[in-house]
Image (spheres, grey):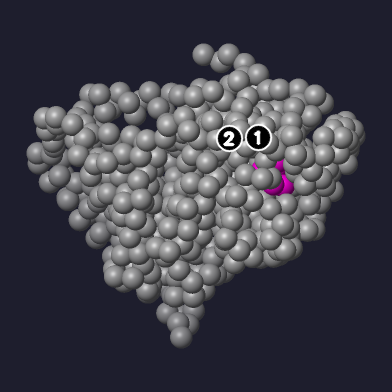
Amino acid sequence: MTTPMDLDPTVAAMQEELDQLRNEVAACRARYDAGAVRDISYANSADAVAPLYTALDLEGSAGTAFEVPGRFPFTRGIHPTGYRGKLWTMRQFAGFGSAKETNARYKFLLGQGTTGLSVAFDFPTLMGYDSDHPRSEGEVGKCGVAISSLADMEQLFDGIPLDQVSTSMTINGPAIILWCFYIAAAEKQGVRPEQLRGTVQNDILKEYMAQHAWCFPIEPALRLIVDMFEYGAQHVPQWNTISISGYHIREAGATAAQELAFTLADGFTYVERGIARGLDVDTFAPRLSFFWDVHNDFFEEIAKLRAARRIWARHLKERYGAKDPRSWMMRFHSQTAGVTLTAQQPMNNVVRVAYQALAAVLGGTQSLHTNSMDETLALPTEQAVQVALRTQQVLAFETGVPNVIDPLGGSYYVERLTDQLEADAEALFAQIAEQGGVVAGLETGWFQRKIAESAARQQWEIEQQRRHIVGVNAFTTEEEGLEIPLLKIDEQAAREQAAALARLRGARDEARCQAQLARLREAARGTENVVPFILDCARSYCTLYEIRAALEDVFGAYREPVFF
């Protein structure tokens, strides 16, 4: 045990060691500056990085020297057992053509060892249109599965017991409707809502910011999200009613720091809206989840995930007064970066995805989707999906990586990056506050301009060969044609969907449908939670667009202002 009398000589000795290190680092830097280095960018997504990191870079910060996993502020992970207790969920994003075709793909994935399902919807569904709507022409089933009613959702999960599988649904503008389809489909299987496990993305703020799959104006869209928080906490307690998503912000061109700050700012906005509704933060915050992009800069991505946990924990506890430790814990899904996949030399994408998956696991993700090599060209084939899943399985069972929690904790570089990204995020929070908050920043185009500026800079670096992309602007070959098979979706899915919708409308109780839609409009005009009314519409086999249109009659439709 160190006594007070021992402190002075101990501190003096430590200071002497630091002074000696400072001199050695200065000498090393002088030799570096005198040497020849390659003429490329030595930077992560935004900032130049030093050639060497030492204890001097952590002066004034202990890093995580006094932190352990499973304890506030959770920089090193939210579970004390890490992946020894439970591996991350291997959740492969899938959907194409009809519900029947995608159901077969899900059964294939489950048979290959995937541990969670993730629904990719086609573009009409993402926008709230039925497959036979004029605006759906040419898009049905092309980039995901077509779901226009409860009947499609029943087919999608036919033979897959919904009390035994965790399901993620990537849907935002009409998320509340698809969630109700899922709950109603589970009821048809005899599964109660409280038995359901999964996540619906439901992050509308990032849609206005980056992805653009919206239905309603901002304020009514936020109301629908809080309705889902409230209903989910009471009736579907194992379901994550939002996945606050940095993925699409990063894919649009944001830096790691911008992805971190803009996503967390969205999360804080949702918390504030829930509290404003009168909800106790500890009733809904434990079911808020996140979704991060895992990009190419290996160490920056690991540090970003560590910083995200720490920032969320501190703000929820200290700013929003959450008392339940589960509210402080950031649980998140990760996906390898689709924007880094290349059409040129597509087999190289297998390598990119493997490194990104490793970064996600070293960063402590709770679930992971690994992109398939062909996703920049088409929806993935079964072979490509299997390779992507096997990438996770090799990482989980052959590398030894999951055996140790946060093995890069204590790295001078990773700890400095973690601290720096946290500081960068806090600085961006201050800028967002100056704009009047997230909603005001969206309405003036501040977020959109920041992302566009970053995207333009990154593209310039590639075009000027400051950043090398293997197979694109470096190590290129003369390719006569693609060497991998591609999955092509024809118009058969659209024809089948149109016929199925015609049969549905002919067989259902039309008077009941119209009555339920009228009740929904009335609820939307007031302040009632609309989830029970949408559920009744779903059970009556009202279609996706019919429900969207009923809400649009009250809320109006969103029209993006021109910012550029």
Query: How far apart, in angstroms, are the residues tagged by discs 1 and 2?
Result: 6 Å
The residue beneath circle 1 is 501
Which residue is located at x 29 percent, y 70 percent? 398
Tally of numbered tags: 2
Q: Nearer the viewer, residue 14 or 232?
A: 232
Determine whether 390 is above or below 216 in the image: below
Q: Mark number for residue 497?
A: 2
Whether 520 is drawn above or below 556: the answer is: below
> Where's residue 528, x and y in %?
88, 41
Amino acid at circle 1: Leu
Disc 1 + disc 2, Cβ < 8 Å? yes
| Residue at image coords 53%, 70% | 79
Q: Is residue 84 magenta?
A: no
Q: Is residue 180 magenta?
A: yes
Query: Which sits in the foreground, 80 or 252?
Result: 252
User: What percent of the width, then of the height, locates residue 236?
Assistant: 73, 58
Q: Which residues are magenta?
A: 176-181
Asked whether, in this view, residue 456 is left or right of residue 537, the answer is left
Relative to 394, residue 529 above or below: above
Main SS category, magenta section: helix
Instruction: Give how far across and how far down residue 437 sits, in percent.
Output: 66, 32
Q: Quadrant of residue 454?
A: top left
